[in-house]
Amino acid sequence: MIGYDDLPALNAALNATSFVLVATGWLCIRRRKVAAHKACMITAMGISTLFLVSYVVYHLEHGTTRFPVDGWPRVLYFSVLFTHTPLAATLLPLIGITAARTLRGDFERHRRIARWTLPIWLYVSLTGVSIWFMLYRVWPS
């Protein structure tokens, strides 16, 4: 059974999985493999939803984890965190709008917003793993 203390590692794994799925989905659509693109992106949305639920549950139970180190590691950590956080907040509506445009068959407008959604989703997923790595593996409290 997974306990609350296991959720940060689970969240990092979900973020890494999301990154791989979104990147694979992008490669699929570049190769005109529409069904594979759709499968990757739907799965990535499901994985990201699981991440969001797990993240909220963890932080409701645990609260905030303080970064324990001063100096350049602290500057690095907060530089990543301060770019990650606002972009993560924009991601949910961006994914929703991008998916809604697909469901309506408005593929031209889907492509226009996906050009923003894709790199933000990749960045947020990758920096989420980086934050976990710095907070729980490199400089644990």
Image (tube, rainbow, N blue to C red):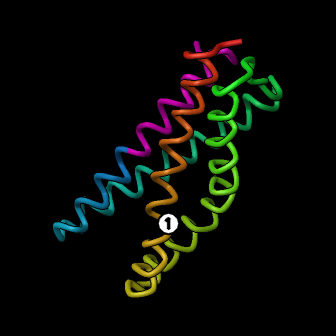
On whether residue 106 falls in the magenta region, the answer is: no
Give the x, y percent position of residue 131: 59, 32
Q: Is residue 18 magenta?
A: yes
What residue lies at 58% left-to-right and 39% top-to-bottom? 51
Q: Which residue is mark 1?
A: 117
- Local crowd at mark 1 within 10 Å, few (<14), some, or many (≥20)? many
* Residue sitting at x 38%, y 83%: 107
Report which quarter residue 42 is drawn in: bottom left
* Image quadrant containing the C terminus: top right
52 shown above or below 104: above
What x and y, as percent, mark residue 38?
Answer: 33, 63
Q: Is residue 42 left or right of residue 59?
A: left
Q: Amino acid at mark 1?
A: Thr
Q: Which is nearer the eye, 105 or 133?
A: 133
Residue occupying the point 54% across, 24% down: 133
Identify the element where label 1 is drawn: helix
Q: Main secondary structure of the magenta part?
A: helix
> Looking at the image, which is closer to me, 56 or 80?
80
Foreground residue among 13 and 124: 124
Q: In the rendered image of this protein, does residue 127 appear above or below residue 139?
A: below
Is 81 located above or below residue 30 in the figure?
A: above
Quadrant assignment, res 139: top right
Q: Residue at position x 32%, y 56% from top? A: 39
Where residue 40 appears, x then y in whole percent? 33, 54
Q: Position of residue 123 (x, y in %)?
A: 49, 51
Magenta extent: 1-19
Considering only vertical position in the picture, is 1 above or below 34?
above
